[in-house]
Image (spheres, rainbow, N blue to C red):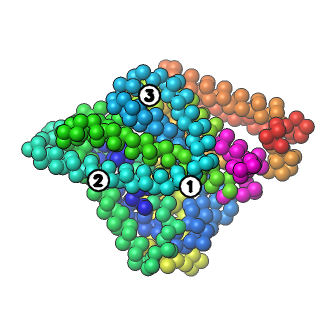
Amino acid sequence: MALCTVIGIDDIMYNFQNQGMSVIFSWIVMVLFYVIPYSLMVGQLGSVFNKEGGGLSSWVRGTDGEFLGYFTAWTYWAASIPYAVDSANEIIVDLGWAITGSEKFQDKISNSTFAILTFLMFIIFIIVEHHFSRSMELLSTIGGGLMVVMTILLVLLAFVGLIKSGGHMATQPFTWKTMMPNFNWHYFSTIAMLIYAMNGCELVAPYVTQMKKPQYDFPKAMIALAAMTAFLTIFGSFSLGIYFNAYHIPNDLKMNGAYYVFDMIGQQYGMGKGLLYFWAWTSVFFNCALLAVLLDAMTRMLISDTGEKYMPKFLRKKDKNGLPINGYILTVSLSAFIMILGIFLPNMNDIFNWLLNLNGIVSPGVTCWIFYSFMRVRKNSEKFPSKYVYIKNDKVAYTVGLILLVVTAVATIMGITPQDVPEGSGTWWYELIINIVSVVVLIGLGAILPGIRRREVEYGIAFDKPQWISMIAIVLIAIIAGISLGATKISLRGLYIIIEGIIALLIVWLIGRRKPDINNGFKAEE
């Protein structure tokens, strides 16, 4: 179960484009010094808070109270927004390959068409999950299993093909130095994507206490997870080096690399495009199920897990079928906001790569909560007993948690640097700005929702119509102005963007602090 949540072909592909063959060195270091301790910490947290279901927000709530528990739930949900948009984008890419068997269809799709098709996917799957949510969870589990099978198949076929070809590799020359990284800013700024690829095992934490002997069986399971992760990442990356020249990697490898490699393997084994089409429909199958589950489960988790103390009433409002309809509207609105930010990038491939970069920022950022919670548990170990304990010495365990927290936090901050575009170019500056804007909006909104809830309690409604309209308009104008400034070549554009952002926030605060007219509110809020 954990393996399906941790690693897949796409994860290997993304990091191969970022680091080339030197990613093999990175995978080895990450498995030994990150995946193993990370997984075992998750095991103890799941054991400590087994009665609360073992969710990330319940861990933080158990150690630090309701507000941090709420904020953890919000950041976990916020991190799922770029992930959901990315999954919707992948469905479009998958369908294009599954129908045409080629990447040429991508040249015929404009950025606006790509965004519209992605948005339609959200609408379709909000309807689909209402009727098939449970079956979609099963399908995503099956799809995840197929992903692992296809990854193993890639490795096996690649190595057999290497023997058949007499040891010929596309990466030439290939020496030990090929696998050693150049420890520069680019390398360290891509570590967040490695963390993004390898996190997720916290999803199996609720099952820790269901094992016969958690204190013995869980560490064995996590070591097996690390071993399989090492096998798939190390040999999977080497397999990519067989078919792609690591010194000249295609710029669209993250979006199309899996199709390219399965096409080449299929041709090598005389299967034509059969293997390519099988992968395409596997990916369609998986991403459709994943998107439906993400839209449903994450929205329900946020609305139900945070309670009425911090979540505004209008977001908790449910329709006759028990669905948090305004919560869905918020999810889709923020997803549309992310898509609009990316629509001004040069082409479809740039949008795809940028979204991955954004995932590599927000997802590791959320992982920090795991290490923080673990540190809090080990600081008060007598208060938080568990059947399974990772490192018996509390001080040593606390130090290990602190080290991983610092590493993850630094990688998250460095990950804000744009990837896959020339440094200092107009596109680079644009992506840097929308990375910061996306993170500020996604996380900042969670910080102000409790204040909105307090206004609801005090006045009956949070804001009246003129307040909502003017505040939303100012925020949109500020975002558009910031994006426009970022696209210029003005030398101090970064400073100007910060100034106009601060001015906009100040105006919004002045408007929002006024007492609302309860007779002039929106019906949805009432």
Q: Is residue 150 visible?
A: yes
> At 74% across and 47% down in the image, what residue appears?
319
Q: Quadrant of the N terminus?
A: bottom left
Q: Main secondary structure of the magenta part?
A: helix
Question: What is the crowding at mark 1: few (fewer than 14 residues within 10 Å), some, or many (at least 20)?
Answer: few
Q: Nearer the viewer, residue 150 or 174?
A: 150
How far apart marks 1 and 2 lie (CA) works out to 28 Å
Q: In the picture provided, is 60 more to the left or to the right than 489?
A: right
Q: Which mark is residue 348?
A: 3
Residue type, mark 2 in image: Ile
How far apart marks 1 and 3 lie (CA) works out to 33 Å
Q: In the picture provided, is 427 more to the left or to the right than 78?
A: left
Image vertical order of residue 290 relative to residue 401, above or below: above
Tell me where residue 287 appears, x and y as whole percent: 46, 44
Magenta stretch: residue 484 in it? no
| Element on which disc 3 rests | helix
Q: Which residue range is magenta in the image? A: 305-331
**Disc 1 or disc 3, which is closer to the eye?**
1
How far apart marks 3 and 2 lie (CA) works out to 29 Å
| Element on which disc 2 rests | helix
Question: What is the crowding at mark 2: few (fewer than 14 residues within 10 Å), some, or many (at least 20)?
Answer: some
The answer to whether mark 3 and mark 2 are in CB contact below 8 A is no
> At 63% across and 64% down in the image, what residue appears?
61
Occupied quadrant, residue 335: top right
* Residue underneath mark 2: 152
Tell me where residue 332 appears, x and y as whole percent: 62, 39
Image vertical order of residue 57 relative to residue 522, above or below: below
**Disc 3 or disc 2, which is closer to the eye?**
2
Q: Is residue 423 visible?
A: no
